[in-house]
Every structure is written in C-alpha cells, then in structure tokens.
Amino acid sequence: MSLIGAATDVREKAHAPYSGFKVGAAIRAASGRIYQGCNVENVSYPEGTCAEAGAISAMVAGGDTVIHEVAVIAGGAEPVAPCGGCRQRLLEFAGPDVTVTMATTGGATRVMRMADLLPGAFDATQMGG
Ligand code: THU
C-alpha cells in the first residue's frame, strides 16, 4: 500500500467530534514497515492528540526509531501542514532530508523536507556546554 493510502485509511478512524477535522498520518520507517495514526480529540480540548503523534507512538511501540518518509492527509482546501509541535516530534526520528507529503482528500499534494518544515530546530547539540 502507498503511504498516502495508509494515511487515507487511518484518517477514517479519527476521533474528531469537536473540530470535525479528521487527519490521518502514515510513517514509513527504516524497517520498511508503515505505521499509522489519526487525531484523537478530547472533551477537555488541550488533551487531544495529533495524527502524527499517534503514528510516532505506533512506530516506537513497533520497534522502529528511524523515519524514512511521512504522509499526512486531511479534508481541507489546502494540503494539511503538521503543527509546530508535531514538526519537533517528527524531527526526533527523521533526518533533514526526510520528506513529508501533505495531502487533501481532494487530491492536492505538497511535499516538503523536514529541514524546510522546521528550520533552526532545537536539537541535542544545544544542550551541550
Ligand atoms: N491535527 C492533526 O492531527 N495533525 C495536523 O497536522 C494538524 C492538526 C488535528 C488536531 C485537531 O484534532 C484537529 O486537527 C484540528 O486542529
């Protein structure tokens, strides 16, 4: 299955009764396995989680820690952009050249590299000294 196909499938399972905005994410990891996640909202709004966070949790639980490719899909007019927090979460496991394909259910896509999604990112080297 394609990565966008995997993201499209899991998007159907999103729990988004408050925003009505369902998101699906899929990660292809170094092992070749694909991990999926969807957004899971909560009546206490800040407790909701993004699709990317769910996919990352599934990946780590599945034994992978290196991201090779990411796809995210939602139903808006423009390809969905990962939120700031999820850019940092993805960067924990993805190098600067990893591509994130952002898509709409209508068929629009946009591809960006992690380095362009989160320029000037905080990383472990900044904790030295
Ligand atoms: N959302 C994601 O799951 N991923 C993104 O990349 C952007 C936003 C979710 C969070 C919330 O459940 C809904 O979309 C509206 O913000």
Image (cartoon, rainbow, N blue to C red):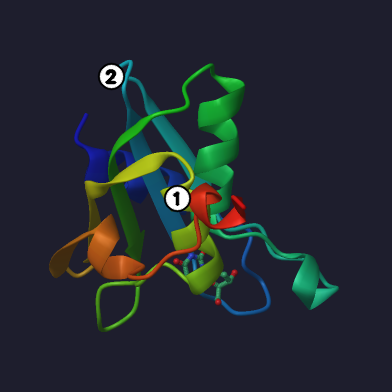
Disc 2 marks which amino acid? Answer: Gly
Residue at the extreme front: 129
Residue under circle 2? 32
Q: Is residue 107 in view from this perspective?
A: no
Residue at the extreme bottom: 77
Q: Residue at x 33, y 60 (%)?
A: 73
* Mark 2 / mark 1, whichever is N-terminal: 2
Disc 1 marks which amino acid? Answer: Leu
Q: Is residue 79 in view from this perspective?
A: yes
Kindly state the secondary structure of the residue where label 1 is placed.
helix
Q: CA distance from mark 2 to mark 1?
A: 17 Å
Whether the residues at callouts 2 and 1 have beta carbons within 8 Å, the answer is: no
- Identify which residue, 16 or 54, lies in the foreground: 54
Q: Where residue 67 sits in the image (x, y, percent)?
A: 35, 35
Indicate which label's residue lies in the foreground, 2 or 1. Answer: 1
Q: Residue at x 77, y 76 (%)?
A: 45
Q: Is residue 11 left or right of residue 109?
A: right
Residue under circle 1? 90
Classify 10 Å Cα crowding around label 1: few (below 14), some (14-19), many (20 and above).
many
Q: Where residue 68 sits in the image (x, y, percent)?
A: 27, 34
Classify 10 Å Cα crowding around label 2: few (below 14), some (14-19), many (20 and above).
few
- Identify which residue, 73 or 84, lies in the foreground: 84
Q: Where residue 51 sits in the image (x, y, percent)?
A: 52, 54
Q: Quadrant of the N terminus?
A: top left
- Position of residue 7 relative to residue 104, above or below, is above
Kindly state the secondary structure of the residue where label 2 is placed.
loop
